[in-house]
Image (tube, rainbow, N blue to C red):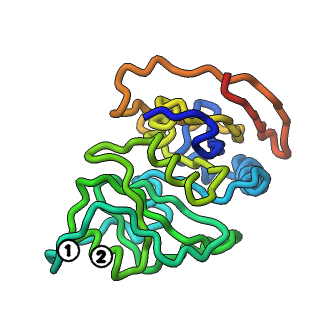
């Protein structure tokens, strides 16, 4: 679903990447990448975004408690309706989890150096009742965006409906590629570390989206290029 820009939040894709376009891998631990990582963290607060959006793999590897173990059957059937009780936070982590795979111990995500954020799970209607019951037990609100495949436009429209005007998209490659294919990325903020990853299995900035297999790419216009400490480089683009 593609929607007009004024019906959805502005989406800024902010990414730390290697010289060869990778957003994961050993390069992140190289000492030469440390200044770029610092720049990435400094810049992320400058975009005025109330929500940060991550895909399932990134959440499982970096933020959630991994993947959920087999769940007991639910005692009741849950309607496929959005559940947003007690939204108290000034900022949110939107966890895109179409199949209901992620494990949680708290509805709040507190990462060192960042303000605590309330988690919102973004689901599709294929999620089993057992997972919805699990989210209710943990106290995590959720939204539906699609029946069996994620509808990026609908997801963003729902975020806009309750006051989120700007979203920071922080990968991984599949999530970035899905929003790119949907025409929903307005700006690119790329912090390039002066290190080449070299591993062909490392995740690239954009991966092919299963929702748009015939997508031919998108063009962006360079707004600013700024050298940073330690030979890092910040590249800021806007969609054409």
| Residue displayed at 64% across by 66% down | 91
Quick one: label 2 or label 1, which is nearer the N terminus? 1
Are the residues at dot 2 and dot 1 in contact (C-beta closer than 8 Å)? yes
Q: Secondary structure at mark 1?
A: loop
Q: Quadrant of residue 210?
A: top left
| Nearer to the camera, 162 or 121 | 162
With 138 as the anchor, is 3 left or right in this view? right
Q: Secondary structure at mark 2?
A: helix
Q: Which quarter of the picture shows residue 209?
A: top left
Picture layout, residue 121 above or below residue 109: above
Q: Label 1, on which residue?
A: 71
Picture layout, residue 202 above or below residue 34:
above
- Quadrant location of the C terminus in the rendered image: top right
Q: Residue at x 71, y 41 (%)?
A: 191
Viewport quadrant of the N terminus: top left
Q: Is residue 99 left or right of residue 201?
A: left
Q: Nearer the viewer, mark 2 or mark 1?
A: 2
Disc marking residue 114: none
Q: Give how far apart the Cα atoms at labels 2 and 1 are.
A: 8 Å
Give how far across and how far down residue 119 sits, in percent.
50, 68
**Mark 2, residue position:** 134
How far from the left and from the top, in percent, is residue 158?
50, 52
Q: Is residue 32 left or right of residue 177?
A: right
């Amino acid at each position: 679903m593609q929607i007009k820009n004024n019906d959805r939040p502005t989406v800024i894709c902010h990414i730390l990447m290697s010289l060869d376009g990778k957003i994961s891998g050993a390069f992140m631990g190289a000492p030469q990448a440390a200044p770029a990582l610092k720049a990435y963290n400094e810049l992320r607060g400058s975009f005025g975004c109330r929500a940060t959006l991550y895909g399932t793999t990134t959440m499982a590897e970096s933020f959630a408690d991994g993947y959920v173990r087999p769940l007991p059957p639910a005692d009741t059937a849950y309607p496929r309706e959005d559940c947003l009780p007690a939204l108290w936070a000034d900022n949110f982590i939107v966890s895109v989890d179409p199949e209901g795979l992620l494990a949680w111990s708290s509805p709040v995500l507190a990462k060192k150096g960042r303000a605590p954020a309330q988690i919102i799970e973004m689901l599709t209607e294929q999620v089993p009742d057992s997972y919805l019951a699990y989210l209710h037990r943990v106290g995590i609100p959720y939204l539906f965006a699609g029946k069996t495949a994620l509808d990026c436009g609908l997801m963003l429209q729902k975020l806009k409906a309750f006051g989120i005007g700007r979203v920071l998209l922080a990968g991984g490659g599949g999530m970035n590629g899905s929003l790119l294919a949907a025409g929903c990325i307005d700006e690119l903020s790329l912090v390039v570390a002066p290190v080449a990853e070299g591993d062909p299995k490392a995740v690239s900035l954009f991966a092919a989206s299963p929702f748009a297999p015939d997508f031919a790419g998108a063009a962006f216009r360079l707004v600013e290029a700024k050298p940073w400490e330690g030979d890092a480089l910040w590249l800021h683009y806007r969609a054409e």
